[in-house]
Image (cartoon, rainbow, N blue to C red):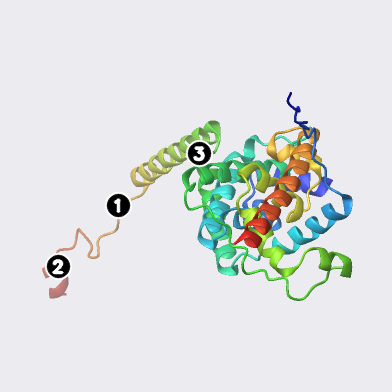
């Protein structure tokens, strides 16, 4: 966390203008986090609003020390809200990833050959079926580009636990894709 | 006699580095960043700032509120006292017509 951000956070405790600056700095990321979890705009907007309202009410008590960077603190609030969301929306859980079609490929040629178009669809479905904690890990790693240490701070786990969870997640994704591929061949 | 069937237990599954990279690239492409609607961002900012103003007013320190209330009371008292003093000291307003000259006589002249 930079000195500038520390000063901004200190001011944001009693200055609406400073809080507005912090909001503008993080709103897109928090929205993305919620959108990729919920898969719809309405829920993403609702959870984003609730994240910032909660941050506003508790920023006075925020202390920047140890692993508690502001980013981790804010994403922890978002994470707690997402966990509640999953609890309330268990039956209708879905993720809207259909809008992102792998048409124009910026990938290097060998990887394009490995992950083909039909496999993207399988991977999407495999991502959909991931449990909440694994999906959180994937979103923080690939959308937010956080390091394992930063993810550990958000999820309240150790860095080693995050590495292990990531490894298990990749294997489960590969397995889910392979199983679906086999069932397609059999039918 | 019977033949014992060999069973193997997989201790830990692994993933090849190339396979991992391909998966990571594919995940990154599927989870592309999304922009929130501008109207939503602007509206939420406005309502957050209004809420913060409200919270700041509500959470003013008690001593500050006491000073404000005390100051207002003292100011009111001082204004009331000064107004009364002014009324007591001020000479009565001069009448429009002189009191000792009856109007009828004045007209006769």
Q: Is residue B29 left or right of residue B15?
A: left
Q: Is residue A103 visible?
A: yes
Q: Are marks 2 and 1 on the same chain?
A: yes
Q: x, y (%) of residue A145?
A: 78, 53
Does the rendering let one see residue B32?
no
Q: Chain of mark 1?
A: B
Q: Which sits in the foreground, A22 or A85? A: A85
The residue wearing badge 3 is B68
Rate crowding at label 1 as few (under 14), some (14 to 19) or many (20 or more) other CA atoms within 10 Å: few
Task: Pick whichever, A20 or A31, lies toward us.
Answer: A31
Residue that mark 1 sits on: B92
The residues tagged by marks 3 and 2 sit, at their Cα atoms, a distance apart of: 57 Å
Residue located beneath label 2 in the image: B103
Pick whichever of labels 2 and 1 is earlier in the sequence.
1
Residue A76 spot, x, y in % from top left: 65, 41
Q: Quadrant of residue B13?
A: top right
Characterize the local packing of mark 2: few (<14), some (14-19) or many (20 or more) Cα atoms within 10 angstroms.
few
- In three-dimensional space, the C-alpha distance between marks 3 and 1, rounded to whole angstroms, equals 38 Å
Is the Cβ of the residue at disc 3 closer than 8 Å to that at disc 2?
no
Q: Chain of mark 2?
A: B
């Amino acid at each position: 966390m930079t000195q500038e951000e520390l000063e901004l956070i200190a001011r944001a405790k009693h200055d609406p203008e400073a809080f507005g600056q912090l909001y503008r700095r993080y709103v897109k990321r928090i929205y993305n986090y919620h959108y990729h979890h919920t898969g719809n705009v309405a829920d993403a907007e609702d959870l984003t609003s609730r994240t910032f309202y909660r941050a506003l009410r508790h920023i006075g008590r925020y202390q920047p020390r140890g692993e508690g960077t502001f980013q981790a603190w804010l994403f922890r609030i978002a994470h707690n809200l997402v966990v509640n969301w999953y609890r309330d929306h268990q039956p209708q859980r879905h993720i809207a990833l259909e809008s992102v079609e792998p048409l124009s490929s910026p990938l290097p040629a060998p990887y394009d050959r490995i992950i083909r178009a039909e496999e993207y669809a399988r991977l999407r479905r495999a991502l959909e079926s991931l449990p909440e904690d694994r999906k959180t890990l994937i979103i923080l790693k690939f959308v937010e580009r956080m390091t394992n240490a930063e993810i550990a701070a958000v999820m309240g786990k150790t860095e080693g636990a995050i590495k292990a969870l990531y490894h298990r997640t990749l294997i489960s994704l590969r397995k889910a894709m392979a199983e679906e591929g086999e069932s397609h061949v059999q039918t | 006699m019977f033949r014992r069937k060999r069973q193997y237990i997989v201790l830990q599954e692994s993933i090849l580095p190339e396979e991992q990279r391909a998966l990571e690239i594919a995940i990154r492409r599927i989870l592309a960043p999304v922009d929130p609607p501008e109207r939503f961002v602007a509206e939420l900012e406005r309502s957050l700032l209004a809420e913060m103003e409200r919270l700041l007013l509500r959470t003013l320190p008690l001593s500050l509120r006491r000073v404000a209330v005390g100051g207002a009371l003292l100011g009111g008292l001082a204004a009331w006292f000064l107004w009364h003093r002014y009324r007591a000291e001020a000479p009565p307003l001069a009448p429009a017509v002189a009191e000792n000259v009856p109007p009828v006589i004045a007209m006769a002249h």
